[in-house]
Amino acid sequence: MIQSKTLAKLLTAAGAAILAVAMFAPAAQALEEPQPGFTQFRGCPRPAEKVMFFCVRSDITGGHLKMGKKTAPIENPLKLTGGTNVEFGEFTANSEGGLSKVKQKVPGGVIGLTGLTWLLEFFGSDALTLYAVTELAGIPSNFTPTSVTLPIKVHLETPSGVLGKNCYIGSTGTPIVLNNTTGTTSPPPPNTPITGKEFTISEENEIAYLKDGIFVDNAFAVPGASGCTLTLFGFIPISLNGFVNSQAGLPSAAGNNEAIQETDIEFALQETVY
């Protein structure tokens, strides 16, 4: 368990923040932009939008997402911004927050994903480059310094649009639910337990910095692909869902998938940010 004077200090300050919000709500609501030095928390709700206790920014800087037989490395950092309640449980973001949509190149491209080598004759190798874009499929919860639950879906994109515009693994109705932890997982077989890494915690200028942590989960299930449609000659639709599922090993039951997320997190009181 993380022992931190920094977090204790913030929790104590939260009590003062509650009183300040109650006494000076009109003034707080007038501050629509983050104060200098806190612009990284822009995705956190403003007091006029919703009163929160903490603003949070989480940067996922590395790792990978393995779904069935396919793995997408995290080479381009993702950003999650929003606000939490005093217990870190409730997460809310404004229109500028949430999870940034960042493309991650998938090894093997569309040919590796579908097994359809004849696509090269129509599109060429550059047009068949494959990207995975992780998107939120629900509201994050259990957001603490040692865990976070992320419901996600993965958008599969190509420069040529060969998979169509709505090729997804997971959806709002059937999300991929990552129960990330810095501790040790308890997956069903064939996966075996893996352990994350707790954060190094420091504080400066009223911001708590949680650095070099690793969130892990290998006990989640992954649904099959949907919306993957190739349109030949501009008018002949061909569903590729079956090809994607067969080649990628989807749907994939719990115990066959893995998420590793190298993460840095920043916390600050909403009252301080705005």
Image (tube, rainbow, N blue to C red):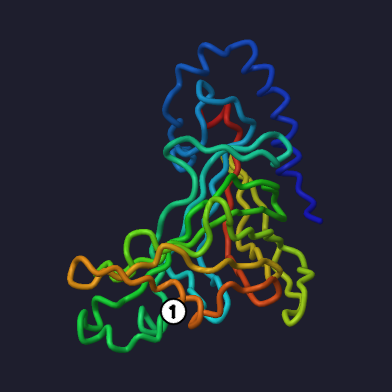
Q: Residue at x 48, y 62 (%)?
A: 154
Give the percent coordinates (x, y) of residue 208.
Answer: 62, 45
* Whole-percent x, y for residue 141 in the image: 66, 46
Q: Where is residue 104 in the image (x, y as percent from the top left)?
A: 41, 68
Residue for point 50% across, 65% down: 169
Q: Can residue 159 be seen in this view?
A: no
User: Where does residue 249 sit, x and y in percent of width and height?
Assistant: 55, 80
Residue pointed to by mark 1? 243
Q: Residue at x 69, y 51 (%)?
A: 145
Q: Which residue lies furthest to the left in this view?
A: 233
Mark 1 Cα-neighbour bin, 10 Å: few <14, some 14–19, many ≥20:
some
Q: On the picture, is 171 further left or further right than 7?
A: left
Q: Which is more toward the observer, 97 or 197? A: 97
Give the residue at x 68% y 21%. Answer: 18
**Residue 45 appears in view:** yes
Q: Specify the quadrant of the image occupied by residue 146.
A: bottom right
Q: Does residue 9 appear to the left or right of 170 in the view shown? A: right
Give the quarter of the figure containing the N terminus.
bottom right
Q: In this view, does 179 lie above or below 230?
A: above
Q: Is residue 126 above or below residue 213?
A: below
Label 1: element kind: helix
The extreme front residue here reads 236
- Count of residue discs: 1
Q: Could you say which quadrant of the image residue 69 lies in?
A: bottom right
Work out whether 216 lies above or below 22.
Answer: below
Place residue 216 in its image quadrant: bottom right
Identify residue type, mark 1. Answer: Phe
